[in-house]
Image (cartoon, coloured by chain):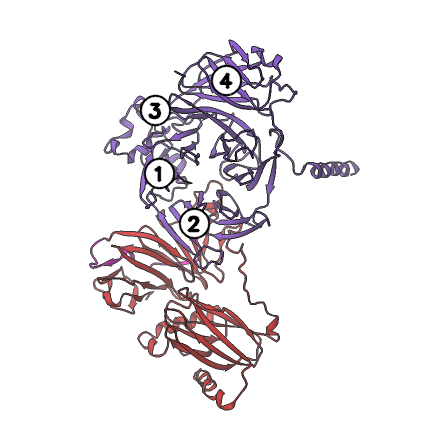
Amino acid sequence: MKIFYLGFLVILSSLLVFGEEQPKRIPAGYAVTTVKTPEGTSFGVGGMEFAPNGDLFICTREGEVWKYQVEIEKWTLFADGLHEALGIWIDPKSSETYVIQRPEITKLIDTDKDGRADLYESFNAGWGVTDNYHEYAFGLVRDGKGNFYGTLNTSLSWPGWARSTKWDVARVWTKGYKDTEGKMGRAAKYRGWGFQVTPEGKFVPFASGMRSPAGIGINKDDELFFTDNQGDWEASSSLHHIVKGRFHGHPSSLTDHPDFKSKDLNDIPIEDYEKLWKRPAVWIPHGELANSPGEPIFDNSEGKFGPFAGQMFIGDQSRSNIMRVSLDRVGGDYQGVIFDFVNRLQTGCIRHVFGKDGTLWVGQTGRGWGSAGGKEFGLQQVKWDGKTTPFSMHDVKLTKKGFRITFTKPVDLTLAKDAEKYNVERWGYHYHPKYGSPKTNSAKENPTSVNVSKNGLQVDIGVTLEESRVYKLNLGAIAAKDGSKLANSYAWYTLNKLKD
Amino acid sequence: MKSLTLFTLFSFILAPLTQAKTDYPISIGTLHGQLRFSPEAFAVKPGSIVDVTFDNSDEMIHNLIFSEGDGKTIDQIAESALKLGEKGMEMGFIPKDSSILASIGLVQPGKKASVRFTAPMEKGDYPYVCTFPGHSLTMRGIMKVVEDPDSIDLAKAKDSSSNTTPRNGVIEVGDDPRVIRVHVAGIDSGRSIAVGLPGGVNYIFDAEKLMIRTGWTGGFINVNRDRRGRGGGLCGIIGEKFQLGAKEFPLRTGSPDKTPKVRFSGYSRRGNPSFIYEVDGVRIEQTATGNPDQKGLTLGFRVPDSKRDLFYLIDSKDLLVSTTAGKWHADKGYVQIPAKKASEFFISIEHK
């Protein structure tokens, strides 16, 4: 009893000193804070956005929209009865509020100004939807010209899983594979598409080949990205750059493509699909880093969130971690590197928004796919203390002979100059109708050359370069000049194209 | 019951003669376009003389009835008012009902009218309502009869968590209607909207086919199967379903035979939920009311700008259909509403 009591005191005092318990892996200078969600409310976060006055609006899988007055920590219900609302966009000037739910994009209007939406205006419903649970509609971002963008999940079509033949439409496995390989299909119009809705409200099918595109993000230059989840035709989870007309790999969506009208998608050889396929900008290795990634968000805080300004952050629902991406433009296309960042939070991380002060708000749900964090839903913040520079790989860029690794602070020169301290592994993936892919063409090596810059911030390593490979760099043996270790010692670089 | 109505009249007429002092001058207004009274609550002492002035600043016609009982009582009064049919206008939609304490007949937009009455001796809540067809669901308030009216907090602050999903998945309808988009077992639609009205009348509006798919009385819905795990279980209706002879795209313009071009525009939740859509470019607003003791709904339509006759298609097997405008053609299976009468009309669909 006494020991128990002492233990309790230790826990209590550590909580008093350090605030709440912190994730096992988190860079120095960063801390996680849990925000109390509305009492008695199931709160699976589907979308988050700040209103111009600083109030945070959150829509949920349960179909509600809540307003959070951050300063006074007060929650107020703004709207309810939506159908699994998985994205929200608020006009930074006029406060006009749009949500995306399964059947449509809805503008929520509080006409009598009592704080509760009373007019639910259907803004666009250009896509088809059935009662198939997998037909999620994800969003919502808007570009500088006023176009909205979102992504539409394929239908769960294989009767073995869907428990009905009702949705078994446009499932693709191609000749030579068993029909059980194709799991997702297209039971209604534009499933598996990314779409645009113009300011006039016109629906434009924008890019095809998506499977389970659970998050869409946009950068300052109006470039669009989405994440997809491992499954049939998807070797691993991945991050894609959306450009109008691109085909991202899952063929069911081609049913709605004018070039494939009246064609049997199962008659088309896999090689033809592979030629059309735009490879992901960044593979997010399944099982190693993420299993079901959510929304990508760019750090536009200009340093308020630490030394990674301009980079992208992505959460994962099942592993409950936050990852960090640095893009590399090679041969006119994006590829790049992904790192683990915070691992792990209290539950699945699928939505993110930056506050004006540079706080990263993480919207969470653990329901449905299991979540390492354990909680069913939640809301957490990741904050940087404004002063501590963590020792991290800031980015990894492709060079003609290998990679240039840039660090946030100088490395220990003795360690950094030793090629034996760098473990480099590479592999490829199959493109096929099967569920996920094992690694193919795997190889391991140590760098053939290592050059450390004078200031100790950059290391060029020479390695064998091959296209269509993921390179995993393990720098666990490298330390900073001041002795600090890397909180995240792995980098996964997706090499689609070599440098000219 | 007649005597009570007379009492109302007497109190209205006799009060000035007897010079009884007014204890509570109460002014009740309307919220413009919202089908709501303002205020929705006031408090008086038992047995006091209450002088109510009804100031109708709305663009619609309204009446005002004070009654004994509760929400169910005024549901019944409203239902009887609806049944007055063509005599309704004449009688101000004030039916004969022993529960009625006092009433003011139809008040035109922008006009005022008064009634003077003695508050009941028995302490408690006494509802007031407008029984003009389609208004009773949301145009209601409470007269509180209490010893110390000044101590009552009339600001009925809405509990912000009252609309959230409880753990068992059973969504209940309280004082305000619920509107929730769901996939419901037995209704093959990706765009169903379930509406739960206070008192236990519910229906599903299909935002794709712009038809009422089903109605039911009793509880509302259970969303548990949809909110567990990945979801995928369909939501369940709690209560007794009834069909409404629904056909796809039932409201048509110009001709009953032509499938119209439609657009679902959304819905308003100010008061009784009102669905807004376009049929061949004509804007339609549609509400529904019903009686929990009866299988059926009264659909209210507002079509401010129809240049052509409207048709509402009903497969009327086992159903009784009536309309406040135009004519029900049982043989043809549609209600025809002349364009000039389409600005506001009601169609009642009941089971025989």
Q: Earlier in the sequence, mark 3 or mark 1?
A: 3
Chain B's colour is red
As helix, strand or loop, the secondary structure at mark 3 comes to loop
Which chain hosts label 3?
Answer: A
As helix, strand or loop, the secondary structure at mark 4 comes to strand
Is disc 1 in contact with disc 4, using a CB cutoff of under 8 Å? no
Q: Which mark is residue A174?
A: none
Q: Which residue is mark 3?
A: A177
Residue B157, quarter of the rendered image: bottom right
Q: Earlier in the sequence, mark 3 or mark 4?
A: 3
As helix, strand or loop, the secondary structure at mark 2 comes to loop
Q: Which residue is mark 2?
A: A96
* Identity, as a three-letter code, of the amino acid under mark 1: Phe
- Position of B257 compared to B242: left or right? left
Residue reaching furthest to the front: A454
Q: CA distance from mark 3 to mark 1?
A: 30 Å
Judge whether residue B94 can be spotted in this image.
no
Is disc 3 in contact with disc 1, using a CB cutoff of under 8 Å? no
User: Residue B62 placed where, x, y %?
Assistant: 39, 72
Is disc 2 in contact with disc 4, using a CB cutoff of under 8 Å? no
Q: CA distance from mark 2 to mark 4?
A: 44 Å
* Identity, as a three-letter code, of the amino acid under mark 2: Glu
Tell me the magenta residue range. B234-258
- Position of A18 compared to A143: left or right? right
Q: Which residue is mark 1?
A: A195
Residue B114, quarter of the rendered image: bottom left
Total tally of numbered discs in the picture: 4
A246 vs B103, nearest the viewer = A246
* Identity, as a three-letter code, of the amino acid under mark 4: Arg
Which part of the image, by quadrant, shows the N terminus of chain A? top right
Q: Which residue is mark 4?
A: A404
Q: Nearer the viewer, mark 3 or mark 1?
A: 1
